[in-house]
Amino acid sequence: MTLDDLRVFVAVCRAGSLSAVARELCCTQSAVSQHVKRLERETGVRLLERHPRGVAPTAAGRILRTAAADGIAGLDAALRHLDELVRGEAGAVRVTTGATTVRHFMAEAVVAFRERFPRVSLEFRTETSSRDCFDALASGAVDLAWITLGGPVGGIEQRPVVELPWVLAVRSDDPLAARSRIEAADLAGIRHIGLPGNSSSRAHLDTAFATLGIQVRCDTSVADWDTAILLAELGLGHAVVPALPGRGASAGAGPLRFLPIAGLPELPVGWAVRRWADLTPLARAFADTVGAMCAR
């Protein structure tokens, strides 16, 4: 049993496909299969079972996958930590985020961090959902994930950074624009631009509506918050979005107004990692820098 065997096995469990891992590693499917077979010979149990659309770990495979993933992630973190000790304040911090995160939450932090650590590279990887961010963390592909916080996730630690109130984006010529705020119950009678269906922010909002007994009609669905705001500006509907940093309720400034919505629970956003204790000093420094900037 080798470290490569375990890495390949964890990758197969994550991808659910031998061929996908073979493409990722630029090798043959047979070579990937040999890694798994070697593990099965040494453990004496079946680790994978075939399904119509790929493979999945057996009960024994899930035990090995969890232990192997934790061990590999810990080893990789230790090696990167040692590399930072050797190289000094140099290296890389790998972050996975949504499409609009860097602009809205990290722009100032990126500048401040680069000024403090000019020899460190920041690597950003865009994902479309928190689930994809968790998968990237579990695979060891990234150090930090910026997410909308939700329920507990096995093997992942979540840390809130800021809670965002909800606002309604309306055109300045809309009758609603004359109001200083809007009640949550009033949202039932207007046409909405829906947030991404697979996003945590959409799930958070839908849960809040259901709890309050509010039914809303979404005629349009978009990929991210910025697109929802753009369509609201074009007059294609109203957008319920988080009050993003630097963008509050403006009285007549520009084509849009952002009206605070009373009665909706705030949206918690922040960091997710495998283990805070295992973060490299540079990754922890970047996380702290973003947190400090968001708290301003």
Image: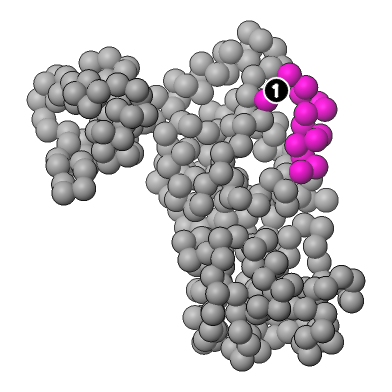
Q: Over which residues does the magenta segment extend?
A: 107-121
- Dominant secondary structure of the magenta stretch? helix
Residue 43 in view in this figure = no
In the rendered view, would you say 191 is above or below 127? below
What residue is at 48 percent from the left and 38 percent from the top? 137
In the rendered view, would you say 40 is above or below 90? below
Tell me where residue 69 appears, x and y as whole percent.
36, 31
What residue is at 73 percent from the left and 60 percent from the top? 244
Q: Label 1 is placed on what type of residue? A: Val
Q: Which residue is mark 1?
A: 120
Q: What residue occupies the far front of the structure in this picture? A: 234
Q: What residue occupies the far top of the structure in this picture? A: 86
Residue placed most toward the observer, 221 or 241: 221
135 with respect to 258 (left or right): left
162 with respect to 37 (left or right): right
Tell me where residue 105 appears, x and y as whole percent.
72, 49
What residue is at 72 percent from the left and 48 percent from the top? 103
Instruction: Tell how many labels.
Output: 1
Whether residue 271 is in magenta: the answer is no
Quarter holding the N terminus? top left
